[in-house]
Amino acid sequence: MTRRLGETPWFDAALAWYFVTVWGSGFLATKIGLQHAAPFTFLTLRFAFGLVCLIPIVLLMQPRFPAGRELGHVVVAGLLMHAVHLGGSHYTQYLGVSAGITALILSAQPLITALIAARWMGETLAARQWAGVVVGLAGVALIVWHKVDVHEASAASLIAVTVSLAGVTAGTLYQRVFCPLVDLRSAAAVQFAVTIAALAPLAWAFEDLRVDWSWALAGSILFLVIGASLLAVSALHTLMRRGQATRVTSLLYLTPIFAVALELPMFGVVPSALSIAGIAVTCLGVALVTVRTFLPARGTPS
C-alpha cells in the first residue's frame, strides 16, 4: 500500500501500451496534419504549441533544469529525437512515399538498437530475443506489404527516411546513456525550444510558413503534442531507464498495428489477410523479446 505508483508491477505494462497506442495513432494524425501544412511548418507549429503547454507546467512545478554538460546532452538528444527523426519521416511522406515504405524502414530501429546495445552497451540478448527482433521485423513487413510501392520512392525520400531512422535510434540511446537522471519536464522544454530554432528557419526558407488553418490541423497538433511529444516520449524514456533498450524499442513493432486498425474507421481502408497475419507474427516477435520485462513473475516486477 505504501509503494509508489511507479513501483507497482503493472506500471511498466501500462506505460508500454500507452506508448504503442499513441505512437501508432500518431501516424494517422500526422497524415491529416500534412494535408494542411508542409512538414517543417507543421513541426514548427507542433513544437511551438508544445512549448506553450510546457511553460506553465515548468513555472508551477519548478523542476530542476539541466546545466553545463548535461544541458548539451539534452540539446543533442532533442535535436536527434525531434528535429532529425520527425523532420526526416514527415518529409519522406511529403515527397510522396507511402506510409508502407516509411513504416517498414523505420521499423528496423529495434534491430539496429539490438546490434548497438549488444556491441557497445553491454546488453546480452538470449537467442530467443534475437529471434523475436527478426520475427517482429518480418511481421511489420507483412502488415504494410500491400502498401509498398517502390516506384514512388525517390533518392531524396529514401535519404530522408534513412536520416529519420538514424535520428530516432541515436536519440533514444543517447538520452538513455547521457541523460539518465534529467527531469523529463525541463528536458522537454529545452528540447522543444531547440527544435523550433532548428526547424523554423527551414520552414521559412523552403515553405514560406504556409498554413491551411482548419479544425483538422488543430486536432492533429493537439493530439501529437499532448499525447505523443509530451506523454508518449516521456513514457518511452521512462521505460528506457527501467529496462533493456532492445526490449523497450521492440515495442515500436506494434505501432503499425494501431495504424492499420484505425485506417478502417477513419479512411475506410480494409486490412488484407496478409496484414492480419502480419499482426499475429509481430505480436509473437514482441512477446519473444519483452515478455520477461512486462510480465511480473510470481507477483514481483521482473
Image (spheres, rainbow, N blue to C red):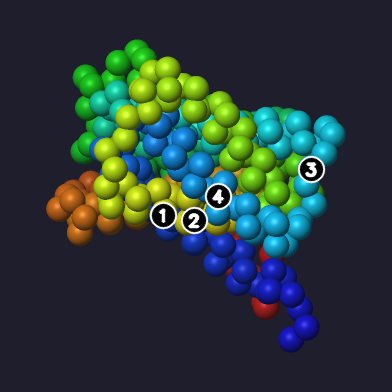
Q: Which residue in the structure is indicated by mark 2? A: 226
Image quarter where the N terminus lies is: bottom right
Q: Residue at x 43, y 22 (%)?
A: 204
Q: Residue at x 70, y 49 (%)?
A: 186
Q: Which residue in the structure is indicated by mark 4? A: 52
Q: What x and y, as percent, mark residue 45?
A: 44, 40
On screen, residue 127 above or below 12: above
Image quarter where the C terminus lies is: bottom right
Mark pair 2, 3: CA separation: 22 Å
Front residue (pair 231, 212): 212
Which residue type carries mark 1? Phe
Instruction: Name the N-terminal-most of marks 2 and 4.
Output: 4
Q: What x and y, as percent, mark residue 126?
A: 64, 46
Eye-nearest disc, 2 or 4: 4
Q: Which mark is residue 66?
A: 3
Q: Are marks 1 and 3 in contact (CB under 8 Å)?
A: no
Which residue type carries mark 3? Pro
Which residue type carries mark 4? Val
Q: What x and y, as percent, mark residue 155?
A: 35, 13
Q: Which mark is residue 286?
A: none
On screen, residue 300 above or below 247: below
Residue 175 makes an appearance in the image: yes
Q: Are marks 2 and 3 in contact (CB under 8 Å)?
A: no
Q: Which residue in the structure is indicated by mark 1? A: 223
Q: Are marks 1 and 2 in contact (CB under 8 Å)?
A: yes
Instruction: Name the N-terminal-most of marks 1 and 4.
Output: 4
Q: What x and y, as percent, mark residue 138?
A: 38, 40
